[in-house]
Image (cartoon, grey):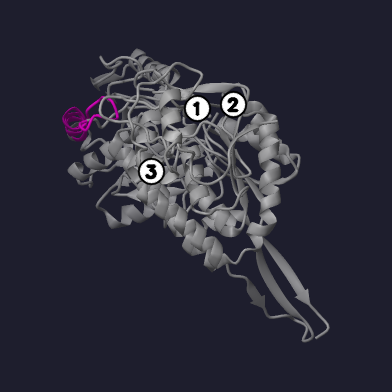
Amino acid sequence: MPRREAASGPAPPQLLLRGGAAGLRPGPAACRRCATMASLLPRRAAAARRRLLLLPPPPPGPAAARRGSWALPAALVRRGGLVGGRWVETPAAFPVQDPASGEELGRVADCGAAEARAAVRAAHEAGVAWGRLPAKERSVRLRRWYELMMENKDELARIITAENGKPLKEAQGEILYSASFLEWFAEEARRVYGDVIPASAKDRRILVLKQPVGVAAIITPWNFPSAMITRKVGAALAAGCTVVVKPAEDTPLSALALGELANQAGIPAGVYNVVPCSRQQTPAVGEVLCTDPLVAKISFTGSTATGKILLKHAAGTVKRVSMELGGHAPFIVFDSANVDRAVAGALASKYRNSGQTCVCTNRFLVQKGIHDKFVEKFAKAIERELHVGSGFDAKTTQGPLINEKAVEKVERHINDAVSQGASIVTGGKRHSLGKNFFEPTLLSNVTTKMLCTQEETFGPLAPIIKFETEAEAIAIANAANVGLAGYFYSQDPAQIWRVAEELEVGMVGVNEGIVSSVESPFGGVKQSGLGREGSKYGIDEYLEIKYVCFGGL
């Protein structure tokens, strides 16, 4: 059984380090001498000192950290799982690494099947009271959680940059986006309306109720370690569900920091649970979450391959499932497009988070009449606007890729394309900074036979295919077996309507390279997933419809 680390509520006045899950990584630690000194201080005083900078002590204890001019916030960095409102440790811990340097940031509890089952039970037990709580009260708790995220937005952003590597500005943007889902669903909690349907018999009344599905298993990726949680959890809690979160092993610290703030916001024990685990423990934990009969709903963001495995597990108990899976987004530039706007949109769509987003453009299709002009301007923009470096460097726009495996995939796609006749316009190799850094790359003379046009790269690679007709572009764009997002640039109104309707994707950006927003339904078609997240539709994924026939009137 897991050992209790601390009761729910504010973090104990000790100095914690940082540590780091579509497979899932670890957490905090304390310098003994400083932790002893801090324990003499009142809790409020300790919280005020949460930015203390320390050199990391040797493992296995967690450590506060200095990396140049930044440090992780001790009060938000936890190393245990969160089960039933309590922080729990496990006999084993796994390391979380800084993808920029490879340095270990700390170690986090390596939860297994036992901890996962305990978290499910805790969520189930908390679900009755949470589901019966008036919607207004759930709304108030979610709103307070949002407010705490905003109060700690800089600290939360530093955690993301440390464990994920993305530039600090992007991390700050993610926190604002992440918090907005708690704000949105705090408001939506009070708008879960039922219905009254006119009956065909005069002595009957037909009522429709909407009720929470129950315990939801939330499995999230590393590329947006905060926003992918709140987009799911905000909707689930607003509906009256309780959750067990399994974060990516590369980035568990963000999920645990959200847990600390949830405790502070008054989210009841057992409503929000977190079971971080290593890659080795992932199959066992995932199986529990997908097969335990107490789990009623699974929400997963990650690869299509992993999603299919989870679907098979979930079929045994016929669970409700929503999934946001892989993408292979086309970005079409027609002859009528404003080329400068198209280049700006391409830069944003392709290279955000170093190309590591599910809605990133993976294939550029540029019409023959403006192809050369677009390639020239795009290359100049890449060389002028993009700067590779540490996410904590203010000039950086391109951080590291998440790990060596990601770098190898980018290299494999480039080598395959070049071997078949593609030309490297700019970039094309590992950056001189080494480790997981890669140069933003642009390829021309690309064909549909190349791997980079058949697989999702998930890295800073932009392959450009030249096309002649609208029909040809639509055929290439729709040839994929996935359909998450698609983009195109045109100034022809008739063409805009045609292409927007013909693209086989769940989200379309017209003369726009970034489409995500809290008000909009996020999701795909084909093998890109099931269901929608965010918007007024997102809460429906966590609600059951119950029909009540009131007779004998």
According to the picture, the residue beneath numbered tag 3 turns out to be: 45
SS of the residue under disc 3: helix
Measuring from the top left, give residue 343's x and y in whole percent.
Answer: 22, 39
x 52%, y 48%: residue: 263
Q: State the SS at label 1.
A: loop
> In this rendering, which labeled residue sits more in front, label 3 or label 1?
3
Which quadrant of the rendered structure holds the C terminus? bottom right
Amino acid carrying mark 1 in the image: Pro
Report the disc number at residue 210.
none
330 part of magenta stretch:
no
Q: Position of residue 417 (x, y in %)?
A: 36, 18
> Which residue is disc 1 drawn over?
26
On the question of residue 363 being in view, the answer is: no
Q: Would you say 176 lies left or right of 431 here? A: right
Residue range corresponding to the magenta coloring:
374-395
Asked if residue 236 is positioned above or below residue 258 in the image, the reply reads below
Residue 506, horizontal then vertical, whole percent? 47, 48
